[in-house]
Amino acid sequence: MTAAGIKQLVWASTLVAALSTGLMAGVFFAFSTFVMKALARLPIAQGIQAMQSINLTAVTPVFMAALFGSTAVCVLLAVYSLVSWSQPAALYLLLGSLLYLVGSFLTTVLFNVPLNNALARVDSGSVDGARLWASYLTSWTAWNHVRTLSSILASAAYAFALSRWNR
């Protein structure tokens, strides 16, 4: 592939990263601003059952493609930024990648998914379920705020990278 072809591919990948991390930010934002609040207003057993259902139905090809596709593009752009550090957009590519990979993807894997797995195992009508639900609402939402902010900032960093492209 020619240098011009690589440049076009990286530009297109950066656009995809800006859009996909923005899309993920929107999903996380919805949960942070109203979905979790709505679930918290339900009776405990219903809130648990609703979130258990959400967690099951979220595992769709479209959502997984958005989550893992964003991650893959961010990894590639991080590598490109490091080997092309003298490029004007490199800093923003690396920043966007790190924000999304650490603040969104790793947070999902290390915090949100384990909390979802614990919730999946609980009986929604049990005392243990009620105890878990109270801590789940607080912890899961706090980590989701991290994912939201990280994804928004990653999207902004990629937008800055695009703005620096022809300079």
Image (spheres, rainbow, N blue to C red):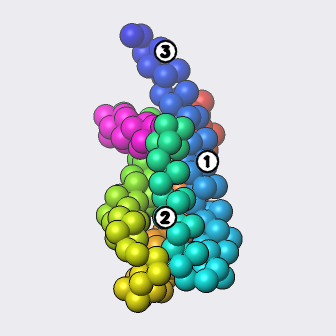
Q: Is residue 120 above or below residue 23?
A: below
Q: Which residue does the numbered mark 1 point to in the structure image?
A: 23
Q: Is residue 3 above or below residue 144?
A: above
Badge 1: residue crowd in 10 Å (few <14, some 14–19, many ≥20) = some
**Residue 57, image x, y percentages:** 52, 51
Q: Nearer the viewer, mark 2 or mark 1?
A: 2
The residue lying at 47 percent from left, 47 percent from top is: 59
Read off the magenta span.
65-83
**Residue 166, image x, y percentages:** 60, 30
Whether 68 is among the magenta residues is: yes
**Residue 68, image x, y percentages:** 42, 42
Inter-mark Cα distance, 2 to 3: 48 Å
Q: Which residue does the numbered mark 2 point to in the structure image?
A: 52
Q: Nearer the viewer, mark 2 or mark 3?
A: 2
Inter-mark Cα distance, 2 to 1: 23 Å
Badge 3: residue crowd in 10 Å (few <14, some 14–19, many ≥20) = few
